[in-house]
Amino acid sequence: MTALMPPEWAVQDWLWIGFPHLAEEWPGWLEPAQEQMADFASAVAESGQQVRLLVRDEANAVRAAALVSAKVTLEQRVYGDVWLRDTGPLVVFEDGTRAARRFGFNGWGGKYLMPGDMEIGAELARDAGLAIQTSPMILEGGAVDGDGTGLVATTEQCLLNPNRNAGMTRAAIEAELAATLGFTRVLWLGDGLINDHTDGHVDNLARFVGPNRLVVPQATGADDPNAAIYADAAARAESFGVEVVRIPSPGRIERGGVIEPASYVNFAITSNLVVVPTFGSPHDAEGVAAIAALFPDRDTIGLPGAAVLAGGGGFHCASQQMPAFPAATTGN
């Protein structure tokens, strides 16, 4: 039987989340980033789903414990970046069992290499009792988004980037995605958001919210820096035969005069709750409401995420789910 990675909206047993700890990664923003990540973890835990918040050391654990709900479980681990979507295990179902897939990791194209990030995915998988299959292909979890039917979206900017897999053709990458994760149809989008540290991860650009149903932002305002990128992504998806749903973008978000890759699309889907990052944009309420309309079976909330974004990512980037067995009906 071919392995298949379930969609994020499938019921989850728990959610791993990384807790910020590096002052140099969040210069001037570390404490508010910790608070925002703690609010994210607490919201998911209070919704009735188990949350495993990774903390780097004892001091980190004390800080986190003072911020999170008592329902959040702390796990002390060695990791550098908090972006577990990329460094954590990707879980598939194969022959009625759960198994982990681990790919090569080179610090997002050699830009951010930190102790523990190459090992944390395998460590989490082993401790969860998962068999691990490895692949030499460089791949971060945020670079792919599947709909549970074998269809996956990704970007050419990331997966075809010479800083990832310079020796692999598009066809070879497609074959590896099919063999390891069960993705037999690949929707290739173009570029990701401007100034995205990940070289254009798809989870900041477009996300599946149902089988063959993809959310893509719509530019808000004439100064929206990603207007052409959004339009190109929507056109490519529609040409591929995918139903496209447009939601508002946050518009132009800057920090110190630099455009930020702010996106409501970096929402995290959990068993009972969808968490959308907000940025103090006049479009925040509209963006959260548009995403809530897509998930009538669970609650949707917006939580401030601008401080988390200062470190290069969002709530989805910082989390990785453990899917429950298909027969499960709750996330508890």
Image (spheres, rainbow, N blue to C red):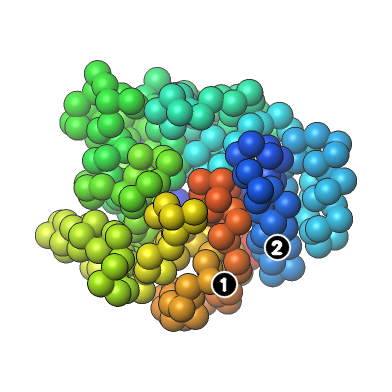
Q: Earlier in the sequence, mark 1 or mark 2?
A: 2
Element carrying mark 1: strand
> Compared with residue 287, is residue 59 higher up or lower down, i.e. above or below?
above
User: Which residue is at 25% across, 63% downward?
Assistant: 227
Circle on res. 302: 1
Query: Percent position (x, y) of residue 116?
Result: 64, 25
Q: Residues within 10 Å of mark 1 (few under 14, many from 20)?
A: many
Q: Is residue 73 left or right of residue 7?
A: right
Camera-nearest residue between 239 and 125: 239
> Compared with residue 176, is residue 291 higher up or lower down, i.e. above or below?
below
Quadrant including the C terminus: bottom right
Query: Percent position (x, y) of residue 293?
Result: 43, 80
Query: Percent position (x, y) of residue 133?
Result: 48, 26
User: Which residue is at 19% across, 32% downward?
Assistant: 170
Q: CA distance from mark 1 to mark 2?
A: 11 Å
**Residue at which label 2 appears:** 39
Element carrying mark 2: helix
Query: Percent position (x, y) of residue 239?
Result: 12, 60
Can residue 49 be seen in the rendering of this structure?
Answer: no
Camera-nearest residue between 137 and 216: 216
Three-letter residue code for mark 1: Gly
> Compared with residue 179, is residue 326 higher up or lower down, i.e. above or below?
below
